[in-house]
Image: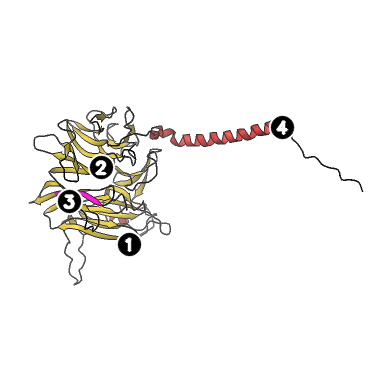
Amino acid sequence: MGTPEKKTPSVLPKISRNLAYRTIALVVVVGGLTLGFEWFMKVRSDLGGLVESETAGWISAVQYLPHGQQAVLISPDGKYHKDPGYVENTVDRDLTWSPKGNFLYFVSDRAEHNFNLFRWAPSEDKPSEQRTIGTRARGDLKFPAQLSEEPDRTAKGLLTTGGLVQEFDPTNQSTAQVLPPTQKEITQSKGGDENGTEGQFEGIYGSLGTSFREAQWCANKTFIVAVMRREQGEVLVAQEMRLVEGKFPQPHPLVAGEHVDFAVNPKDGSIVYCVQGFQWTDGVAPPDRDGKKAVKPFVNGMGVFTFGEHAKGLVLTGNQGAVVFSSPTISPDGKAIAVVVGRSEKGEVTIVGIATYPTSNDPTFKPAQIRGDLHEPSWSPDGTHILAAVREPGKPRAIYEFPIDGTPGRNITGDTGNFGFPRYSPQQKGG
């Protein structure tokens, strides 16, 4: 038996090895180019969204002009910054910062006299960019109050248009309706009709109100809370956005009145509400323990709602009409509420100042009171100051900054114009 022939391993010729290496490299390059092209296609319509602005200490506000109103920015050095794209005799309104302060969004009718959404990058000396189109007026864009790691370029917010609530996607300028859900998306009551197409405000939502005024995500984006207008007054509604057996649960009316304001706690996603002229949510007083019509708990009041497994409501304060609460705003640490306080007499409300309340039963809380004809408060990112628009007889409507420790406030705008709705950028130095 002969010795087995020893086989030598096959070796590619050098030219074949080079060709193989080049093929692999080409595949890698093509793959990288494909991924890069896909990324470019996603952002090509929003290259301005890649901008990062340094806005720590900046303040946004509306300046009221003889004919129109304009969005303005005030930097920490006191310099005014105005959008080069502003058109005379038009209206800028509903100013809001993006979550990380890279952009200022606002609604304006400067383009064809239709109220659409615009985005302004403070770091660039360029006109703001129009981010929505259409003839239906957009309004009151609100981003989630609870912070996330999502960049400003892709952060989505809720706005209202045509009485509906839509979610705005800044990457492609699109809006998609979220409230009311379609009849096929929402669980019906036992008497509900799931067949056929109903109007937007027929069925369940039609029994609550006629249109939406404002809306915002809360409870880590598991709920949307919204103010709905109705024939007489307003109602605050919570809609859970987690599907149950493929459909959204029915909405829950939380509180109703002649006027309702709310704010979302940036820490736990609960909400604070202020109600003027309390009303029963379904328009009818429920029976009390004795079977008689229940008595209204208050006329004007303020309370808290929490969501989740242990959902509950808590009335913080209430009265029989002598004191009015409005424009609540919650401190960044979630522990304090700043609210405008007024006194009501014979149907006339006189603003007396801003007061702070705890968001929970905290015996160590130290309340603050700032007296004056103050409006539209907002907290500084570190929670040590409150901005407000101040009216003084014979003077322009100015922006003041008030320390919450009780020391005197400072007039930021002086007599340079009439201003309203001041808001700090959410950025902090070194943050």
Name the magenta segment's main secondary structure. Answer: strand
Residue at disc 4, secondary structure:
helix
Pointer 2 with pointer 3, Cβ within 8 A:
no
Pointer 1 with pointer 3, Cβ within 8 A:
no
Q: Label 2 is placed on what type of residue?
A: Ser
At x 21%, y 62%, the residue is: 284
Residue 310 image label: 1
Residue under numbered circle 3:
325
Residue 342 visible: yes
Residue under numbered circle 4:
16
Q: Label 1 is placed on what type of residue?
A: His
Residue under numbered circle 2:
380
Picture quarter with the C terminus:
top left
Q: Nearer the viewer, mark 2 or mark 3?
A: 2
Q: Which residues are magenta?
A: 335-341
Residue 349 placed where, x, y %? 11, 48
